Amino acid sequence: QVQLVESGGGLVQPGGSLRLSCAAIGSVFNVYAANWYRQITGKQREWVASFSSGDTRYADSVRGRFTISRDHTKNTIYLQMNNLKPEDTAVYYCNANVTTRQWNDYVGWGQGTQVTVSS
């Protein structure tokens, strides 16, 4: 069984930084692809960044400020967020594709973590 557990959200001032983590826990062999999304209450979930086979992509609104990365040894995906703006305030969700130790594919979501950018 696999779970995706997020951490790292919080309150930060405009211009500040946060790093979100998404750890794949359980019978995990490899996290081979992942996405970060965000959602403001009452609005649709918005794609933010993706990682797949070493390729990374970003939404225009975060390119140059956010960085998605993977620590293969920890089965963890990160989202480094710099120069944060009030409009980055949202609940952030990770979505990952995992190969389990039983050689099955698992696709799931983290529980979400709140990021608030405010002075």
Image (spheres, rainbow, N blue to C red):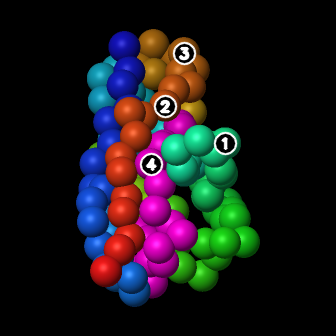
Tag 1–tag 2 contact (CB < 8 Å): no
Residue 44: image tag? 1
Q: Earlier in the sequence, mark 3 or mark 1?
A: 1
Which is closer to the viewer, label 4 or label 2?
4
Label 1 and label 2: CA atoms lie apart by 16 Å
Residue at 29%, 73% in the rendered image = 12
Which is closer to the viewer, label 3 or label 1?
1
Q: Secondary structure at mark 3?
A: loop
Q: Quadrant of the N terminus?
A: top left
Relative height, residue 103 to residue 56 (above, below): above
Which is closer to the viewer, label 2 or label 3?
2
Residue 109: image tag? 2
Label 4 and label 2: CA atoms lie apart by 13 Å
Residue 65: image tag? none
In the image shown, does 106 or 104 lie closer to the viewer?
106
Q: Earlier in the sequence, mark 4 or mark 2?
A: 4
Q: Residues within 10 Å of mark 1 (few under 14, many from 20)?
A: few
Q: Would you name the residue on which mark 4 appears?
A: 91
Q: Position of residue 60 (x, y in %)?
A: 72, 72
Label 3 and label 1: CA atoms lie apart by 30 Å
Q: Start and end of the magenta stretch?
A: 80-96
Q: Earlier in the sequence, mark 1 or mark 2?
A: 1
Q: Would you name the residue on which mark 3 appears?
A: 104
Which is closer to the viewer, label 3 or label 4?
4
